[in-house]
């Protein structure tokens, strides 16, 4: 199933829809200034975006399809005839924008609102009272990306019967009586009504303009004045909550990123791809079912003052949509700068009778105190300065090797990615940056000082992005360290914020902001980090399909390409023979190490669960699936290490709950051996 990343649309609209039984057919007025704002946004996109792409008929077609899915991405409201009626706009949206007209956005939304009301009347007046037969062999397909639009109301009725039947069965298996099921569904959908009535003309315009922006690439976004304020608050890290980025995905609210330093990350209980299906306040507040809710409404429930508790009802990613939900309690907190800084530790490992000390530096982001730096403060806080201190401390304790852990590091300061690379190489280019004007600049490390010359492993995963990819790519290109893990995210672009009010000069009609892609990163070899990311030297098992997660999952992403390489001097520390030897040792562990083989099995099971989108509507089948998923979850719980005949853990001398870190350390230990040998 492909996850649709639709930017700020996620803060405005919904995955599954908001619901109404009796809701006025409000006619939304196109506010003065919308047409001029739209024309300005398109002009900026055409002239300043990296692609230098004209808003043409072909792009108009892309925008139309994307806008329809932003309103109804589960294809459960619009009819096929509605879609046909919108075809008149397929090649004219570009022309209309240039005429300062945004009428299609509102006309299409008005049709959606009408269909929405029809669906919800059917749900609230008929379906929630229906006595379903749970003994039949029937399935509900949660992923409707490839499904056609319904040809008739009868088809939509059938679809919604499956939706409500699936929700009713979940409630029944949770121990609810028929009366309680009806009341729960009634409350759920009445809340949808209230949520839907809060939609404004600004929401509609914002969604439409963001659809146009994202047609250029997924990191180019339009922000209405309201959502621009939210974005700025988040960038300033002044928000309070659980520290997770959420994504609407069909009828679920899905976690797509755990923010380093937040309550979710510290709890170790939430993971990317987990689905939130309920939210409750405090220890005894009512658990509010949020299946099908607008994303911004779910976010409102989850966010709250520092120190307060929130309970989440979650479908864990490892067991999928057919697994049992779990309740997770978190204490809301602010994400503090100190929680985002580098951390160090030493892991001792006895290898063939020899005690080895391995240093680990975990880096959640590439940070720097920009204000202090601009003031000329030589002691400004930064990634490179903190890592430098940690390395010296670890060296004083006699480490034999070092792991730099960049997993889930979404990037940050480009300057810090360069400076951090400089701690491990003499001097030389680190990254090339190509602008929208096709000028290429080579950014160098000019400091000849090397802080650490010993064996090194860089640990990455699918959520390592941007500055993380620059650092990992440079370390790999210079043969300075071994890169271990998953292929990275593939975000090789740079964005800038443009305040539209600077151009509009219309205080009565404030405009929003445009986040615009203006540059692209390239490695010193000339290979882009965009789309493909960094491929590790040692590939560890992964449950994540690149077509579902990462830059390449979005068809609008800028492509991978190459430019000319720049001159640089590789170190003599690694060569293809060493990498081949390390891979050979890893392959041997895949055959003989019970911990690793068990992890591979868990990963394969998780991949199957990620890809399973059908839900059985048969009570016996669903109950069996829940029980099996619960058994597997318990069996795979941290600490369930396999034992040998003497009852001792079989861990290859290294017992860690974090299998990725464990493998990174074992590769580092192999690297030590290869250097000694």
Image (spheres, rainbow, N blue to C red):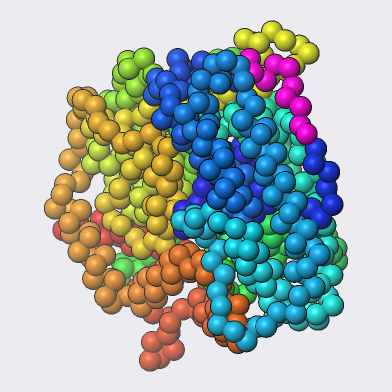
Residue 19 belongs to the span the image colors magenta: no
Taking the image as drawn, is residue 313 in sight?
yes
The range drawn in magenta is: 27-36
Give the residue at x 80% y 63%: 124
Quadrant of image for the C terminus: bottom left
518 vs 454: above or below: above
- Quarter assignment of residue 317: bottom right
584 vs 342: above or below: below
Taking the image as drawn, is residue 259 in sight?
no
Give the residue at x 38% y 87%: 644
In the rendered structure, the answer to whether residue 350 lies left or right of residue 633 reads left
575 vs 314: above or below: above
In the rendered structure, the answer to whether residue 309 lies left or right of residue 672 reads right
Most foreground residue, 458 or 450: 458
Q: How many numbered circles does the render carry?
A: 0
Most foreground residue, 513 or 332: 513
Query: How far from the left and from the top, in percent, is residue 407?
Result: 46, 50
Give the residue at x 63% y 32%: 105
């Amino acid at each position: 199933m492909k996850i649709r990343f639709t930017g700020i649309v996620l803060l405005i609209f919904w995955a599954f829809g908001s619901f109404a039984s009796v809701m006025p057919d409000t006619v939304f007025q196109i506010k003065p200034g919308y047409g001029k704002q739209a024309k300005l946004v398109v002009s900026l996109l055409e002239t300043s975006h990296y692609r230098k792409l004209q808003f043409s008929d072909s792009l108009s077609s892309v925008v139309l399809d994307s806008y329809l899915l932003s309103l109804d991405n589960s294809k459960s409201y619009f009819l096929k005839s509605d879609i046909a009626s919108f075809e008149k706009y397929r090649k004219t949206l570009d022309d209309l924008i240039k005429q300062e007209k945004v009428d299609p956005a509102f006309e299409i939304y008005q049709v959606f609102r009408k269909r929405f009301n029809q669906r919800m009347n059917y749900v609230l007046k008929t379906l929630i009272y229906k006595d379903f037969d749970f003994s039949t062999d029937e399935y509900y397909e949660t992923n409707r990306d490839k499904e056609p639009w319904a040809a008739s109301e009868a088809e939509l009725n059938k679809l919604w019967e499956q939706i409500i039947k699936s929700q009713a069965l979940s409630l029944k298996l949770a121990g609810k009586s028929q009366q309680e099921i009806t009341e729960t569904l009634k409350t759920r959908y009445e809340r949808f009504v209230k949520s839907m009535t809060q939609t404004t003309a600004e929401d509609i315009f914002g969604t439409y303009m963001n659809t146009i922006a994202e047609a250029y690439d997924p990191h180019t976004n339009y922000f209405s004045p309201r959502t621009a304020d939210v974005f700025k608050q988040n960038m300033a890290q002044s928000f309070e909550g659980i520290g997770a980025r959420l994504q609407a995905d069909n009828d679920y609210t899905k976690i797509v990123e755990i923010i380093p330093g937040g309550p979710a990350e510290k709890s170790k209980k939430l993971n990317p791809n987990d689905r939130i299906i309920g939210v409750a306040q405090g220890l005894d507040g009512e658990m509010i079912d949020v299946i099908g809710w607008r994303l911004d409404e779910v976010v409102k429930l989850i966010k709250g003052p520092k120190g307060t508790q929130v309970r989440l009802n979650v479908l864990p990613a490892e067991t999928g949509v057919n697994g049992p939900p779990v309740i997770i309690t978190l204490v809301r907190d602010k994400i503090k700068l100190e929680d985002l800084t580098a951390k160090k530790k030493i892991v001792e490992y006895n290898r063939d009778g020899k005690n080895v000390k391995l240093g680990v530096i975990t880096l959640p982001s590439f940070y720097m105190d920009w204000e202090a730096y601009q003031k000329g403060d030589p002691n400004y806080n930064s990634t490179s300065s903190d890592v430098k201190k940690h390395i010296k401390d670890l060296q004083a304790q006699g480490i034999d090797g070092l792991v730099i852990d960049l997993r889930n590091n979404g990037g940050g300061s480009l300057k810090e990615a360069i400076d951090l690379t400089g701690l491990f190489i003499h001097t030389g280019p680190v990254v090339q940056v190509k602008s929208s004007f096709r000028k290429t600049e080579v950014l160098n490390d000019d400091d000849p000082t090397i802080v650490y010359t010993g064996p090194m492993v860089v640990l990455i995963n699918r959520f390592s992005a941007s500055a993380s990819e620059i650092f990992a790519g440079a370390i790999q290109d210079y043969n300075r360290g071994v890169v271990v893990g998953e292929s990275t995210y593939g975000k090789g672009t740079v964005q800038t914020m443009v305040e539209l009010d600077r151009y509009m000069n219309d205080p009565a009609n404030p405009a929003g902001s445009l986040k615009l892609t203006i540059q692209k990163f390239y490695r010193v070899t000339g290979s882009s980090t965009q789309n493909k990311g960094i491929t590790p030297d040692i590939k560890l098992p992964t449950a994540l399909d690149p077509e579902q997660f990462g830059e390449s999952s979005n068809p609008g992403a800028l492509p991978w390409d190459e430019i000319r390489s720049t001159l640089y001097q590789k170190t003599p520390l690694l060569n293809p023979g060493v990498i081949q030897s390390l891979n050979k040792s890893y392959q041997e562990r895949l055959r003989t190490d019970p911990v690793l083989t068990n992890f591979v099995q868990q990963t394969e099971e998780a991949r199957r669960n990620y890809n399973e989108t059908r839900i059985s509507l048969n009570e016996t089948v669903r109950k069996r699936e829940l029980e099996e998923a619960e058994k597997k979850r318990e069996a795979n719980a941290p600490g369930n290490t396999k034992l040998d005949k003497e009852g001792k853990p079989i861990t290859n001398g290294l017992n860690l709950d974090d299998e990725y870190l464990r493998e990174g350390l074992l590769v580092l230990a192999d690297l030590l051996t290869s250097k000694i040998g």
